[in-house]
Image: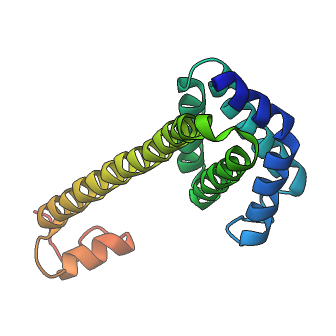
Amino acid sequence: MSNKLYKVMLENRALLEDEVFLRLNASGVLNKHALGEEPLRERVALLVEKLLGSLQETPGVFVSYVESITDERIDEGIALHELQLALVVLEEKIWQLVVESIPLEDQVRCLGMITLIVGTAKDRVAHIFLHHLQMVESEVTFLRRQSGFLEQASDSGPATEDDVNWQRGSVKPHHILA
């Protein structure tokens, strides 16, 4: 059964890649000046390749790949819209191909496999994003506390003539040294 699914996906690899590329390109979620057509096509081809690898070998290959690119995108400061949309489009197109190409008695298992693989990858994107968000929120809270401590420690009241003179570079000229 999984051989049938793999064979159908392999035969339609170019169609899958084109569908994901075209939908991403038309969606407006991409930062077009940062990512040209060729790098986008390469990313899409690699995503489809990893999915095919999961169908032939182990489902974890695709999920691990999606986890790594999720971390990569977050570290680059890039929104995850591109990745989320790619996964949705890929799943939609595969479902369509399964319904059109796989015998009815095998469709439920094939669709279940695709939902498991792509769905797990989507869940991991959300989990990783939330983890990073919690880390950032925790860091912001820490920095706010630190700035509050600094404000308290450095607040010695209103500036005096001595403070102003010292900031100008003169050494307390109004004090008489004994």
- Residue 118, quarter of picture: top right
Query: What's the residue at 38%, 69% (across, down)?
Result: 169
Query: In the figure, is residue 16 to the left or right of 80?
Result: right
Instruction: State how the image is colored.
Output: rainbow
Q: Is residue 99 above or below residue 144?
A: above
Residue 113 screen position, x and y as percent: 54, 34
Residue 134 screen position, x and y as percent: 30, 51
Residue placed most toward the observer, 32 or 118:
118
Query: What's the residue at 23%, 74% (across, down)?
Result: 163
Query: What's the residue at 67%, 68% (across, down)?
Result: 29
Q: Is residue 144 above or below residue 48?
A: below
Quarter of the rendering occupied by the N terminus: top right
Query: What's the residue at 64%, 25% (across, down)?
Result: 2
- Residue 103, quarter of picture: top right
- Residue 114, quarter of picture: top right
Query: In the figure, is residue 25 to the left or right of 142?
Result: right
Residue 83 screen position, x and y as percent: 62, 52
